[in-house]
Amino acid sequence: MFEGFTQETSEFLWELSFHNERPWFLEHKEQFERVLNRPFKALAEDTLEKMRELYPEKGMQAHVSRIYRDARRLFGRGPYKDHLWFTVKGDGSYQEGPMFWFEIHAATYSYGLGFFDVTPAEMERFRRTIDADPARFERLAEQVRRDGRFRVIGQEYSRQKGDYAEPVRSYYNRRYLGLECQKDFGGELFRPELPEILAQAYRSLMPMYEYFLSVHNAAKAAGETWETRRSHG
């Protein structure tokens, strides 16, 4: 059961960023387990349980990141991540398609909805879906805007696509998409109620999740996702 992180969690992540090497990590392995790994996994498990209670029909699953970097992709960095994340989603693939997420760093934490690992064809389908019924997407985007907690993130095209006003414009011109709530370390992180806070935040984003999922499923059926490209390649 999640009981909250502590200030020592932040201190450990700061120290890890400055001493990202195996001898230091092994010396502090017990601290890692106590202040970061065990509470983080408990948070993911409790949040998943809350989402399953809210949406028993969706087959929600969680994927929790590991502290260890892929040795093939170090690129001069240390062997350990200086942050952890987990995702919660209901379509069976932990990497592709829309997903709810949570991430913790030494100085900040964030959570929201991501539609990140997408092909250009998938995002083109997203834009065509908006074009087919702009009013529907505008209602969803306006709902997120009125909520006030989340900002739209994702790399933008240098040349503007489409001719929509806000709030649709913020979504339309992206290579990939996310909705993020970012806060300074502390506050909710220390509270046992954090799983419920996350589940209710995700609940507020569920209409947008469903929209992204419908786009992803249509793109997958047409062979436009990374998953279908790999399987046919």
Image (cartoon, grey):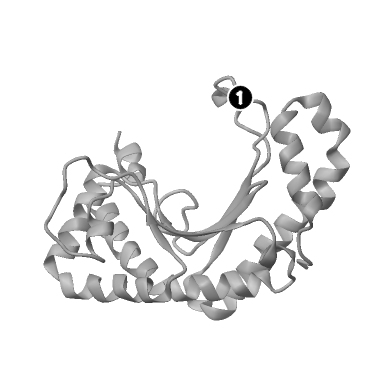
| Above or below, 105 relative to 165 | above
What residue did someone put label 1 on?
A: 77
Q: Is residue 215 left or right of residue 129?
A: right
Q: Quadrant of the C terminus?
A: top left
21 left or right, relative to 129: right
Circle 1: element type: loop
| Front in this rendered view, residue 20 or 147 | 147
Q: Position of residue 50 (x, y in %)?
A: 62, 75
Q: Compared to 168, does 21 lie above or below? A: above
Residue at screen point 33% across, 47% down: 118
Q: Position of residue 27 (x, y in %)?
A: 88, 32
Residue name at image x 34 percent, y 76 percent: 143
Residue in the image at 16% along x and 42% along y: 159
Q: Position of residue 135 (x, y in %)?
A: 17, 75
Foreground residue among 119 and 130: 130
Give amino acid for label 1. Arg
| In the rendered image, the vertical position of residue 1 relative to residue 62, given as above or below | below
For the point 76% across and 64% down, which residue is it? 4
Q: Give the side of residue 208 with respect to residue 162, left or right.
A: right
Instruction: Answer yes or no: is residue 102 visible.
Output: no
Give residue 120's quadrant in the image. Answer: top left
